[in-house]
Image: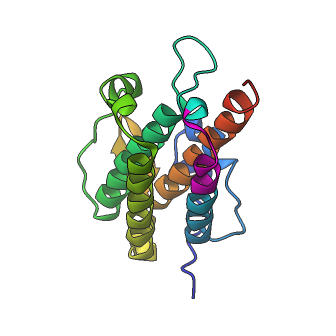
Amino acid sequence: MIKKIEFPLPNEYPAYAEMYMKLVKKDVSLIEQLKLSLHQTKKLINNLSNEKLDFKYAENKWSVKEVLVHIIDDERIYGYRALSFARNDKTNLPGFEQEDYNFNSDTSERTIESILEEYEALRLSTIALFKGLSDKALKRIGVANGNQASARALGYHILGHDLHHIKIIKDLYLNKQ
């Protein structure tokens, strides 16, 4: 049986996260959606040439590979935040500067195979994390970068953030070449 993680209430996540939440299906299991996005993203990326993976649709924009590494970084950070909140850690967790992360990621030195391997391993770990959290733990609230959120809201954020960037890849990267 698939674990049902209820969609968070609007007071369980900051207003900026609404852009991600609206991309997630409320009536389908978070776990199933995480699995589906993993397979869909891998399929999409595996069908791209190296030229498309390195393509930037405008000056000072990230390549497709860099977007994927950004998705990984964000999922890893938000997964840690979810764990901290679920365990009732009252530490105000720091934010992070995504441009610095990207600049220092050395993505151009990596193969797409290594990036997808990391993406898959992390996603499976994220799924295991959320499957292992009790309903009580999923509803616990914490603070990161000055914003309150529940552990379950962070799971939906992870998924919505992934979906957001995959849509950008499809709309702005693949349709511009």
Residue 3 picture quarter: bottom right
Residue 67 vs residue 44: left or right? left
Magenta stretch, residue numbers = 41-50
Q: Is residue 176 above or below residue 32?
A: above
Task: Provide residue 59's location: percent of width, then percent of height.
Answer: 56, 11
| Residue 164 higher or lower than 121, as above or below | above
147 vs 29, left or right, is left
Residue 58 x, y percent position in the rendering: 61, 14
Q: What colour scheme governs how the chains and residues are painted in the rendered image of this protein?
A: rainbow
- Comparing 35 with 135, the one in front is 35
Quadrant where the N terminus sits is bottom right
The answer to whether residue 136 of the structure is visible from this angle is yes
Residue at 32%, 31% (x, y): give it: 105
Majority SS type along the magenta span: helix
Magenta stretch holds residue 129: no
Quick one: which residue is furthest to the bottom in this view?
1
The image shows residue 129 at horizontal and vertical percentages of: 38, 68
The answer to whether residue 47 is magenta is: yes
**Residue 102 at x, y = what percent?**
38, 27
Query: Residue, x 38% and y 42% (percent of image)?
Result: 73
Does residue 18 appear anywhere in the picture? no
Residue drawn at (40%, 56%) of the image: 117
